[in-house]
Structures are given as structure tokens and as C-alpha cells.
Amino acid sequence: MTEQTLTVDVVVIGAGAVGENVAERTARAGLETLLVERDLVGGECSYWACMPSKALLRSGAALQAARSVQGARQAVTGQLDAAAVLRRRDGFTSHWDDAGQVRWVHDAGIRLLRGTARLAGVRQVSVAGADGGHSSIEARCAVVLATGSTPTVPPVDGLDALDFWGTREATAAAEVPQSLLVLGGGVSGTELAQAYARLGARVTLVARRDLLGRYPEPARRLVEKGLRADGVDLRLNTAIRTAGRDADGYRLELAPDGGAPEQVGGARLLVATGRKPALAGLGLEELGLEPERLRVDPSGQVRGVDGGWLYAAGDAAGKAQLTHQGKYQGRAAGDAIAARAAGELDGEPAAWSPWAATADEAAVPSVVFSDPEVAMVGLTADMARERGLDVCTTELPISVAGSSLHADGYAGWAQMVVDEDRRVVVGMTFAGPDVAELLHAATIAVVGQVPVDRLWHAVPSYPTISEVWLRLLEKYGL
């Protein structure tokens, strides 16, 4: 066992995608930076979330795309090879080996310490090593919490006694179960339900509310239709009375709204009902902070901490639980730490400066990688009105030359939300096959606050699905 005392400029707790981005920025600025990680370097996204889940989805989407075009359809003679899909997934996770990520950390000039970290005082971090050793670390400038999030489990009678899958187990599974019960109709539940249905499992999805509740209704219905076409048995707006297991597998007793109780079963049960910031056991309470009420400024600096030495970024900061947004926050936090250390930043940073994650409040892009996809950025009409904006919405089916060429019978939908006072786009939603690739143009329009009169001159190439921008602006009145 080793006992050591270290002093560095910056300690980053959590070496996932967010922590790596913070550390890369501070190290690049010349600050001695230490990453602390108790699991795999690279974090949830690399091994159990973004990459493996999208790898599981991609093969089915490619097969469906071929089947949706005459000529290609006739060439498709088989089904997905589930074993090959799982092997491809394994490649994207580097077979759950983080050696490559560790090399990147060292090459970036960042120190790495394996173990479980806890705040031990002002600028003090205590790390219990996996080998039983202990490290006491002092940070001259900052400590950053980049600890990600943990799954939440709903209060269903009997559920806590079951050995069910979380998203980690579902994305890392070594085989496809004959049948799968999915509890949760959010992004993870929706994506994994479709992935496993296309891999050959009989899937039942149960959700207490509607599917993908934060997205506009027409988009939700298109995804619902896609899931049903893949054979997913959807039980929406349905309460769950009890959960259990018998010789045949897992059982959920349902109480449908207005209907008689019934049971659904599956060989496996996946609980995908959301996540919460992973802040338990970090010692925040000893600093007078409540983990469930942690608040940060736009640079990630935790409010209410004397000296401004504590930061949080990514899921730990309680904002949008999206890898790309967490990495953006990490870059802002790392640059802010470096700027404050150099005396270049005092107080809260200005909006849209390099040290402020301003897009968190105005332009968060998100994609549901179902088939059809849903891509959204900025504000919905309801969100905009809650902020006091005078908005109008323009919406229409995606029916342009590009979409017709893309797939026979292409079905899609688009909505544009415009702030009428400034005549700028504040929100966009697209639903349909492969609409994720439309999203960055919308993100640029929202972040850049481009007036719709100027957007009119951004001519979409013909024939592409992007021609929907022209149709939206025409319907708006230009």
C-alpha cells in the first residue's frame, strides 16, 4: 500500500469525456493537472452509453435504409446478424479496455491517479486507491467535479429485489435475449427497445407517461409508429403496480389508465427511467453544500463556495445530460480556471465568452437515434413563452425532392420557432430518417441569432433534405 501527499494546480475528479476536456484545457494552459478515476478512463459514453448504444442501432438503421429504396430492397435477402452486430459494438468500446485513453492522458501531459476521490476540505482531495493505498492532494487553483450521473430507479413494489439490467448491462450484453421488457419511454428506453427489437428480441416497452415526452407531439408519433413497425409492444401512459420474477422470467403487473390490470413478461428486464448527478459520497455536505441543490455559474464554478475553487461540469452540474454539452461545459470550465489563474478573468464571465457555457440556456442540441430520428435544438414554443418571448411556430411535413430520393415513402416533420420581436429562430425540431445531419445548421442559426430575413439567403442545395429550410421560411411568409 502506498501513502502519498501531492500538490498540483488542478484536480479533476472523473476521467470521462467531460473530465478529459477540462483536464486537456488546463494542462494545455500550463497548469499541472491530475485526473482521478475509479473506473475506465473515457467514462460512460465510451463504454456503456453513446458509442455502444449507437453501434447497436446503426446496423438496423442501415438495413432499414436499404429496404426503403427500390432496387436496394430487392438485394436484401437476410436479417441482421446479431452476433456480428455485437462484435462490431465491442470494437467501438475497445473491448472495455481503456489503454488507448490512458495513453492519450499521458501524451496530453496530464497525470492520472486510479481510485475513489472525496473532498477533504478547501482545495483538498482524498483518494482511496484500488490497491488499498491513499493519496492526499492539494489543488492550488481548482477542484473539478466531473463525476457524471447514476441511474434512478422508480418506486415500484418488488423492483428493488430484482437483478435487472440498467443501460450499462443492456449496451454491454453478450447476447440478445429472446424477449425484453423495457421500463421507461425516454431516450435510452426508446433507443434500446428498437435496437433489441431489430436484433431479434420480442420487446415490450412500458412507460408511465408518453414516449419521449419532452419532444413535440408530431415527432413523438413518428417514433411511435417506427417502434410499432419493428414489433415493439408499447404500453404508454401506464402505471406499474408490482415487479417480480418467476420461472419464465420477469413480470410487471400493469394498471393501464382506465383499463383492467394485466401482466407483461420478458426474459430480461431493462430499467431506463432516467439518471441523476453522481454527487453522493463526495463530501459536499462537509463543505456546507447540498448535493441535490448544487448550482454553478456559466463557467462551472460552484456557487456558495468561498474562494471560488470548486467547479462542476457535465451531468454532475445538473444540466442537460448530453455528452457533447458536458464536453462543451468542460472546455469552458477548463479555460475559465486557466484564465482566473492567470488573472485574466475576475467574477462571472460574460455571456458567449470563451469561459461561459451560454448555450446551456439557449441552444442545446439533442438527437434521439431511433428510426426515424428526432433532432431538436433551442426552445420549444412552450419553453419560449414561459420565458416571456412572443413566438410563432411554423411546421410542416418533410416532403421535398431530397427526402423523396432518400427513401421511398419518406415520412418526416419539421418545426421552426421564431421570436417575433427579434425575428430570429430560437428553436428547431426535425423528425424523420437521418435528420440528425440537419441539426448543426439549425444550431448555428440559433446560436448566431441569424435573422430569418438573412436565413432566406442561405439557399439549400437541391435535391437534399435541407430544402425543408426553404419550405419552412416560405410558409413563415418570406
Image: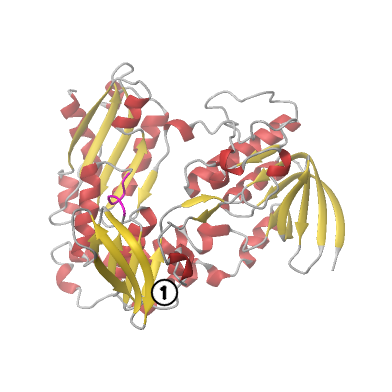
Left or right of 239? Residue 358 is right
Q: Is residue 59 visible?
A: no
Q: Which residue is mark 1?
A: 86
Q: Residue 454, can we see it?
A: yes
Residue 149 in the image: above or below residue 302? below
- Percent position of residue 309, x then y: 73, 36
Along the viewing direction, whichever of 36 and 244 lies nearer the viewer: 244
Q: Looking at the magenta stretch, what is its main secondary structure?
A: loop
The vertical placement of 244 against 51, above or below, is below
- Image-based side of 5 in relation to 472, left or right: right
Q: Which residues are magenta?
A: 208-213
**Rendered position, 315 above or below 296:** below
What residue is rendered at 72% in x and 51% in y?
118
The image quarter containing residue 454 is top left
Residue at 46% x, 61% y is 51
**Rendered residue at 30%/66% (across/down):** 253
In the rendered picture of this protein, how many numbered marks are placed on residues?
A: 1
Q: Quadrant of the N terminus?
A: bottom right
Q: Secondary structure at mark 1?
A: helix
Circle 1 Cα neighbour tier, 10 Å, few/some/many (<14 / 14–19 / ≥20): many
